[in-house]
Image (cartoon, coloured by chain):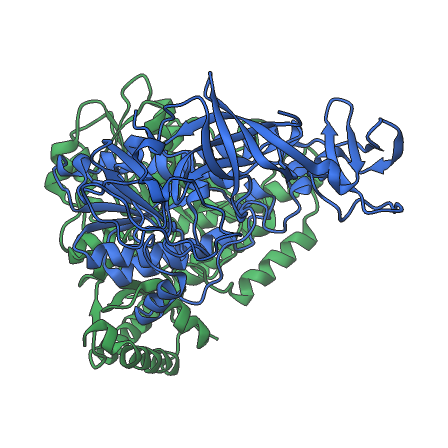
Chain colours: A green, B blue
């Protein structure tokens, strides 16, 4: 199998799995229990959390463990809106958000919140002028992605945070799921930040919401005190220890891995140039981990199937607000509905080998030839 | 109201629509101000070849195509596009895995259909999107399906789905989008008769594929805004076009059975869906004597012979059900024959102008029509008396009345009539 879908999921690092197993074997108590077995787990989690906080440059008290990025996003969006309901109920979001952001936003819209979608530029970035126009005194939440999962566009989070300084009622939630562990990220700008370790060689089933200490949000899961009032439940000690390990490993090797992926990305792009009908949709300045392309005249889902039949895994925008419609992100950058329907995503890792990229290029070359007549090439 | 019989030319005056007796029925067209080539019908139709409703629309050549992912609606979309219409495609998502009792990690057949429809829309280069109608489908189709079974009938959910989902919903969507027509891949024909000022529903040119039976409930406003581009072409031609166009579904089988009960175990579906178990009960003979035990009355349908599970000296059939007593009556085949039926929720496409109308009628989808006389009753009901007694007339199924190839109307069978 040639796996080129690392933005969907990464294989856990063996060291992460080892840490997980070791923790699960060693700590049998519940962190919420008041005996020494519980105390032992609490001490472990305190240490892990201190380390994570130090790696991210935040306070240990600002880290909330969840079941994954989807829960973190839900908690932030719903939690902020509910806590701020006396101030206002206007939300600004983007068409680039993951369903775990756009879903709760739609839900809140149905519950009476006002929602505006900020425009996307031709380079895939949020139109900051449009954001300024949309902001109001009763805007309580701006929710943006740090790196959009389809094109890999890096969004101007710092500039957005600077704009929001004039709006004291407004909180900024950043979904950094495609950024953390891959590119440098400054946690200082946002009120809440989501990430999950399965995107950087950790495990599924756990995630983080980093929440500014001063910010009060309503919990999603009520009951018990737990390690954090914002999220009750028995902390998943093994998964959290594994998360800490994954974060340590990927942040430790961040520059080195980023460089490796950048080289692979350049190699892939160079190879794609010789295939007729290929169009690159990811803008310049996108993260090198994600390359969104189209093959003219062939639907993205059809290419995904053809590649999958040859053992090559890529991704096509699937979950979205309206099924069957073209990707809004790709539509925004290409202004071409048909091209957007043809788009698919290749996502790379430092684990990717050049021969894997060669195999992909060969397969795309074949598909381009096969479908050349129908594509009008 | 037009008087059908009065308008019929002398030589064509009797209603003959029984395809069993007249397999090659190909009567002459008999319109007074228009031609109707190839029409096998008896009702004179004045075909004006215009559509006054669409003429008034801002975008007369535009259509919303209901794309099921099957070959028929794909070719229907192709024909509309070829004929110069601005087209938008849509597939209605009617249910999800959990609605039909499948685990959420299994790939649902409806998902494959959506992918196929999207693929064909891409090929035709028409905008396409999926409409989520799962809530309406539960309310209007699945709940009613269960209600009819529990009341002792045998429902026809496809007819309700056509009415509430395909046409009511899609016509609303088309209107919102400023599109003049809703197009489906049904094999039937719609014609505007300018003399009567009525839209008529007629059988398809290909009698083997005719689907007019499931469309009897369409009203005038709906018929004015619907197109069936496959009404004039044989199924083989549809497959040929699909193959020629390289559609992914050119070879796909026609859909069978009830889409939300893919394994055919409708009682299992109902038990899972409602959380009820349907209790076992007694089989009785005509006189009420207990002759055996059944697995629950909902399992049986009138006319059923197989699966009764007890042997008698002569073949026995399910002849009646009493849901209140939870009994199923068995009897010889001759007890299945009834002279007529009563139907409710009747829709007249060609409104009756007499108290008794000679018709041919179908009480099942693939049935040869039988001759009879229909009597319109107050409250959207009708009585139909057949010339010869008919076998296994089933409550819950549709009765559709024809005059030649013209659908006069139809309704839901609510009871049977033994004598006249």
Instruction: Please tell me which residue lies in front, A157 or B89.
Output: B89
Vertical arrangement, residue A5 with respect to residue A192, above or below: below
The quarter of the picture where the C terminus of chain A appears is bottom left
Q: Quadrant of residue A213?
A: top left
Residue at 25% x, 73% y: name it. Answer: A374
Q: How many marks?
A: 0
User: Residue A317: x and y, percent?
Assistant: 34, 56
Vertical arrangement, residue A128 with respect to residue B346, above or below: below
Q: Quadrant of residue A297?
A: bottom left
Q: Is residue B50 left or right of residue B108?
A: left
User: Residue B311: x and y, percent?
Assistant: 88, 47
Q: Is residue B187 left or right of residue B96?
A: left
Instruction: Please tell me which residue lies in front, B207 or B25.
Output: B25
Instruction: Please tell me which residue lies in front, A247 or A7.
Output: A7
User: Residue B127: x and y, percent?
Assistant: 24, 52
Instruction: Please tell me which residue lies in front, A10 or A274.
Output: A274
Residue at 27% x, 71% y: name it. Answer: A262
User: Residue B387: x and y, percent?
Assistant: 57, 36
Vertical arrangement, residue A265 with respect to residue A56, above or below: below
Task: Mark yes or no: residue A62 visible.
Answer: no
Residue at 45% x, 74% y: name it. Answer: A309
Q: Is residue B283 left or right of residue A186?
A: right
Task: Mark yes or no: residue A33 visible.
Answer: yes
Q: Is residue A367 left or right of residue B342?
A: left
Vertical arrangement, residue B111 with respect to residue B388, above or below: below
């Amino acid at each position: 199998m040639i796996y080129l879908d690392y933005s969907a999921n990464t294989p856990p690092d063996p060291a992460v799995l080892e840490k997980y197993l070791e923790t699960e074997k060693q700590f049998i108590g519940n962190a919420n229990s008041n005996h020494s077995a519980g105390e032992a787990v609490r001490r472990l989690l305190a240490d892990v959390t201190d380390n994570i906080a130090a790696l991210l440059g935040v306070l240990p008290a600002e880290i909330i463990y969840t079941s994954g990025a989807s829960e973190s996003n839900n908690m932030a969006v719903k939690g902020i809106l509910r806590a701020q309901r006396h101030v206002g109920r206007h939300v600004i979001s983007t068409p680039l958000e993951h369903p775990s952001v756009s879903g709760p936003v739609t839900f809140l819209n149905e519950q009476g919140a006002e929602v505006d979608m900020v425009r996307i530029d031709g380079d895939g970035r949020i139109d900051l002028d449009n954001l300024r126009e949309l902001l109001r005194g009763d805007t309580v939440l701006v929710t943006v992605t740090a790196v959009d999962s389809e094109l890999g566009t890096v969004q101007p989070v710092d500039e957005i945070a600077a704009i929001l300084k004039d709006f004291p009622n407004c909180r900024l939630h950043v979904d950094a799921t495609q950024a953390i562990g891959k590119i440098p990220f400054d946690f200082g700008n946002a009120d809440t930040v989501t990430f999950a370790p399965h995107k950087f060689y950790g495990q599924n089933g756990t995630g983080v919401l980093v929440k500014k200490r001063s910010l009060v949000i309503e919990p999603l899961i009520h009951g018990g005190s737990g390690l954090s009032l914002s999220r009750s439940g028995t902390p998943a000690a093994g998964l959290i220890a594994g998360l800490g390990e994954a974060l340590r490993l990927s942040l430790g090797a961040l520059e080195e891995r980023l460089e490796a992926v950048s080289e692979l990305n350049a190699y892939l792009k160079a190879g794609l140039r010789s295939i007729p009908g290929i169009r690159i949709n990811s803008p310049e300045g996108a993260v090198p981990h994600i390359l969104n392309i189209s093959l003219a005249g062939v639907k993205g889902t059809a290419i995904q199937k053809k590649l999958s039949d040859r053992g090559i895994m890529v991704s096509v925008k699937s979950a979205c607000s309206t099924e069957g419609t073209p990707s809004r992100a790709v539509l925004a950058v290409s202004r071409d509905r048909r091209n957007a329907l043809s788009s698919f995503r290749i996502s790379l890792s430092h684990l990717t080998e050049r021969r894997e990229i060669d195999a992909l290029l060969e397969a795309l070359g074949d598909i381009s030839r096969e479908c050349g007549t129908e594509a009008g090439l | 109201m037009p008087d059908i019989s009065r308008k019929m030319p002398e030589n064509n005056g009797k209603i003959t629509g029984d395809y069993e007796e007249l397999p090659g029925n190909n009567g002459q067209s008999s319109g007074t101000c228009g031609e109707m080539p190839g029409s096998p019908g008896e009702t004179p139709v004045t075909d004006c070849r215009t559509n006054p409703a669409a003429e008034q629309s801002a975008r007369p050549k535009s259509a919303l195509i209901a794309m099921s992912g099957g070959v028929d609606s794909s070719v229907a979309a192709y024909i509309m596009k070829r004929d110069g219409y601005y087209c938008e495609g849509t597939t209605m998502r009617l249910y999800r895995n959990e609605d039909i009792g499948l685990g959420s990690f299994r790939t649902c057949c409806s998902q494959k259909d959506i992918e196929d429809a999207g693929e064909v829309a891409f090929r035709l280069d028409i905008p396409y999107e999926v409409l989520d109608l799962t809530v309406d489908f539960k309310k209007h189709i699945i709940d009613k399906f269960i209600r009819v079974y529990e009341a002792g009938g045998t429902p026809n959910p496809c007819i309700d789905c056509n009415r509430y989902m395909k046409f009511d919903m899609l016509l609303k969507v088309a209107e919102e989008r400023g599109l003049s027509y809703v197009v489906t891949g049904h094999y039937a024909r719609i014609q505007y008769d300018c003399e009567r000022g009525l839209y008529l529903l007629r059988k398809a040119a290909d009698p083997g594929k005719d689907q007019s039976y499931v469309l009897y409930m369409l009203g005038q406003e709906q018929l004015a805004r619907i197109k069936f581009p496959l009404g004039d072409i044989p199924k083989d031609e549809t497959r040929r076009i699909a193959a020629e166009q390289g559609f992914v579904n050119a070879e796909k089988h026609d859909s069978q059975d009830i889409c939300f009960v893919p394994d055919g175990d409708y009682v299992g579906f109902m038990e899972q869906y409602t959380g009820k178990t349907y209790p076992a009960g007694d089989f009785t003979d005509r006189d009420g004597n207990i002759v055996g035990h059944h697995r629950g009355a909902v399992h049986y349908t009138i006319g059923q012979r197989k699966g009764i599970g007890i042997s008698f000296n002569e073949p026995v059939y399910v002849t009646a059900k009493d849901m209140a007593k939870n009994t199923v009556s068995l009897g010889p085949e001759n007890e299945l024959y009834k002279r007529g039926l009563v139907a409710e929720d009747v829709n007249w496409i060609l409104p009756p102008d007499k108290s008794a109308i000679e018709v041919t009628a179908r009480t099942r989808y693939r049935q040869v029509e039988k001759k009879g006389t229909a009597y319109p009753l107050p409250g959207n009901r009708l009585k139909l008396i057949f010339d010869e007694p008919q076998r296994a007339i089933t409550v819950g199924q549709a009765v559709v009345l024809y005059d030649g190839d013209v659908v006069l109307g139809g309704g839901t069978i609510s009871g049977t009539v033994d004598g006249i």
